[in-house]
Image (spheres, rainbow, N blue to C red):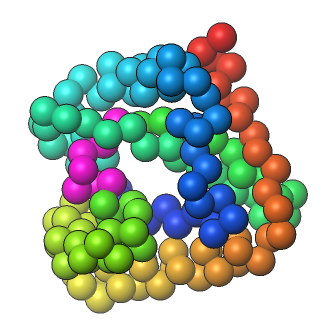
Amino acid sequence: MKLDFELVPDSCWYSNLRSILSSAQWDIVRKEAYARAKGKCMICGANVSRLEAHERWEYDEENRIQKLADVVAICKSCHEVIHIGRTSLMGGEERASAHFMKVNGCSYSEYRKALGAANEAHRRRNAVPEWKLDLSYLKKFT
């Protein structure tokens, strides 16, 4: 899927690069993503006036490592899909599901299947008691 859900483990909620880096350091990272995007969402390709920086994480469940893989510049609609749990709590699941299906060219049943798979991965990752953080991605900014 071009656009997918990225459900972070519950123990990692409320911790992100903005809370780890200084505001000046975060500006460097997010602006690099905006420059790569050239005014277009890096997922759906929409031309938008305001992009949002999104952290892409990879999870090594066996070694309990949460690794920063990338920071991408995306539109609000794609960001709402990625964080579907929060979006649903805010009453936006219908809008997000429509965007997911449009971007991926898929049906509602395929949307539900992908959401089920994301929830299963989320359940597994929640079983990990503590994640080690790998921020080696940030070395390119030093």
| Quadrant placement of the C terminus | top right
Q: Position of residue 50 (x, y in %)?
A: 19, 35
Residue that protrudes farthest toward the right in the picture: 63
| Residue 131 within the magenta-colored segment of the rendering | no
| Residue 74 within the magenta-colored segment of the rendering | yes
Marker count (numbered):
0
Task: Say whether residue 17 is left or right of residue 50.
Answer: right
Residue that protrudes farthest toward the top in the picture: 142
Task: Determine the image quadrant of residue 134.
Answer: top right
Q: Which residue is located at x 65 percent, y 80 percent?
A: 123
| Quadrant placement of the N terminus | bottom left
Residue 66 in the image: above or below residue 28: below
Q: Position of residue 129 (x, y in %)?
A: 83, 69
Whether residue 105 appears in this view of the structure is no
Task: Determine the image quadrant of residue 68.
Answer: top right
Q: Nearer the viewer, residue 30 or 20?
A: 20
Task: Determine the image quadrant of residue 69.
Answer: top right
Q: Which residue is located at x 79 percent, y 57 percent?
A: 131
- Magenta span covers which residues? 73-79
Q: Position of residue 9 (x, y in %)?
A: 64, 67
Q: Which residue is located at x 24 percent, y 50 percent?
A: 76
Q: Which residue is located at x 51 percent, y 75 percent?
A: 118
